[in-house]
């Protein structure tokens, strides 16, 4: 557990900026994707419909220039006749005029009559027409028709069909096969949609990122201000330049901070007044009890009772001193201070208690290790932490105080092999008036946390039940590294 910063076990949270960017990108991708798909489908259908209409028109035009009566004279073996060459020449001119791939004429049995390719002799059946039987059924009923899009060597084609009449009866049909150039246009259009979607996503990320920074910066400032208030550091004004709901929230938080500061000041004043009112009669009680004890002989049982009263009065005075220090903390006076003498003085004061409890003590602090602190206050912290460790090891144990320098900080650890603390106790350790001792004000660790924060440091508690406790102080080593502007 750490006093002065979020704990390592705090649940990770998703940043609002990330959510905003993701929401914008998803929204734009959905809108662009759906719009692109709709446009793609509409364009594809429109171009395909135009292609079909063009094919049918060309096939109808070719069929009107062919006589069903003349086609009756085309029989197998007449490919070199003048009639055949004349008709094929007419179809080839039409083929060049409309840019067709192939124009061919066939009878109701799907046998070739005329073919611009010259590869199909009269009377040979067209295999590909077997796949267009459904479309050709419309042709034999006197209507135009067209095939579906098909590929030949990865080149797209479509075929339009028109009937050829003789005496009002369909005797043959003409087929016009043209390359479906619109497919390439559709592919280019599809790629354009994808590129547009990608550019839209990038533009959206940029806009969302800028908007997220605009929104999250004041929110982050409010979060930091709320954390400082939660730690008890209420000297920093809550300020935000926003003139929207975020600004209103900042103003509300600032109003709350001021009221908390005023209430805290009133409580501290009241607590200090009550402590002084109690201390004055306690001083008189201790004085008169001392006079009574001095008048009683050494072996008198009444003198022992009076001495117990004096001891309890002194204990109450120590409790009142803690109350006063918590209620009216003095401003720290930081300066470069050697840590070894502070640790040594604390150990000297606690030496009788450690000897009585059978505790082995070790100190590993370099003589030249310094921190930029108020020495008297940090010594009070060390005494409190070491005394807690001694009291936790009533049946003996091992107490080690070590100090090192790391990253511009002096790190002081007070480690014991006592019973440790539960997570519930650690969570409330720095709360005022919380204590696990039968006799105690519950202000010791609250004052410790307050002093450490006043010295711009941090205190970490690493403890598990049955495995001992390590109290770790992180103290600044220089004035430049840590601002000391008064709050």
Image: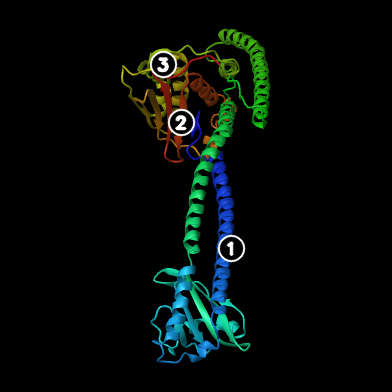
In the picture of the structure, the residue carrying the numbered disc 1 is 46
In the picture of the structure, the residue carrying the numbered disc 3 is 480
Label number found at residue 460: 2
Contact between marks 3 and 1 (CB within 8 A): the answer is: no
Circle 3 or circle 1, nearest the eye: 1
Disc nearer the start of the sequence (2/3): 2
For the residue pair 187 and 205, the one nearer the viewer reads as 187
Q: CA distance from mark 1 to mark 2?
A: 72 Å
Disc nearer the start of the sequence (1/2): 1
Q: Is residue 85 left or right of residue 67?
A: left
Q: Looking at the image, which residue sits at the far front?
A: 82
Above-or-below relation of 3 to 87: above
Q: Is residue 79 left or right of residue 213?
A: left
- Looking at the image, which residue is at 50% across and 56% down? 189
Q: Residues within 10 Å of mark 3 (few under 14, many from 20)?
A: few
- SS for callout 2: strand
């Amino acid at each position: 557990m750490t006093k002065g910063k979020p704990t390592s076990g705090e649940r990770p949270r998703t940043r609002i900026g990330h959510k905003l960017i993701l929401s914008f990108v998803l929204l734009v991708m959905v809108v662009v994707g759906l719009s692109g798909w709709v446009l793609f489908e509409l364009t594809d259908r429109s171009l395909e419909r135009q292609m079909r209409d063009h094919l049918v028109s060309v096939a109808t035009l070719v069929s009107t220039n062919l006589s069903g009566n003349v086609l009756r004279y085309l029989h197998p073996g007449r490919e070199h006749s003048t009639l055949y060459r004349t008709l094929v020449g007419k179809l080839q001119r039409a083929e060049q005029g409309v840019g067709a791939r192939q124009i061919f004429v066939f009878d109701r049995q799907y046998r070739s009559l005329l073919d611009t390719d010259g590869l199909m002799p009269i009377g040979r059946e067209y295999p590909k027409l077997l796949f267009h039987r459904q479309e050709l059924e419309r042709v034999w009923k006197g209507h135009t028709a067209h095939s579906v899009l098909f590929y030949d060597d990865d080149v797209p084609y479509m075929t339009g069909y028109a009937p050829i009449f003789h005496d009002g009866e369909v005797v043959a049909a003409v087929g016009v096969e043209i390359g479906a150039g619109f497919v390439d246009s559709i592919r280019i259009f599809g790629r354009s949609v994808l590129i547009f979607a990608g550019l839209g996503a990038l533009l959206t990320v940029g806009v969302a990122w800028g908007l997220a920074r605009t929104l999250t910066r004041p929110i982050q400032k409010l979060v930091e201000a709320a954390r400082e208030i939660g730690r008890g550091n209420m000297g920093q004004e809550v300020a935000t330049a926003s003139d929207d709901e975020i600004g209103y929230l900042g103003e509300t938080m600032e109003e709350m901070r001021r009221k908390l500061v005023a209430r805290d000041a009133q409580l501290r004043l009241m607590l200090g007044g009550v402590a002084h009112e109690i201390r004055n009669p306690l001083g008189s009680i201790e004085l008169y009890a001392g006079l009574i004890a001095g008048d009683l002989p050494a072996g008198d049982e009444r003198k022992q009772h009076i001495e117990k009263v004096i001891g309890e009065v002194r204990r109450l005075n120590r409790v009142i001193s803690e109350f006063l220090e918590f209620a009216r903390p003095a401003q720290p006076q930081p300066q470069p201070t050697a840590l070894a003498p502070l640790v040594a003085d604390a150990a000297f004061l606690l030496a009788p208690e450690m000897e009585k409890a059978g505790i082995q003590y070790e100190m590993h602090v370099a003589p030249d290790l310094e921190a930029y602190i108020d020495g008297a206050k940090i010594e009070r912290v060390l005494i409190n932490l070491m005394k807690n460790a001694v009291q936790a090891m009533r049946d003996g144990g091992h107490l080690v105080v070590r100090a090192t320098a790391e990253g511009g900080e002096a790190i002081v650890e007070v480690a014991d092999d006592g019973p440790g603390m539960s997570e519930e106790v650690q969570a409330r350790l720095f709360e005022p008036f919380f204590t696990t001792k039968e006799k105690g004000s519950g202000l010791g660790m609250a004052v410790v946390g307050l002093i450490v924060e006043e010295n711009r440091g941090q205190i970490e508690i690493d403890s598990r039940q049955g495995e001992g406790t390590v109290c770790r102080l992180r103290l600044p080593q220089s004035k430049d590294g840590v601002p000391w502007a008064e709050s």
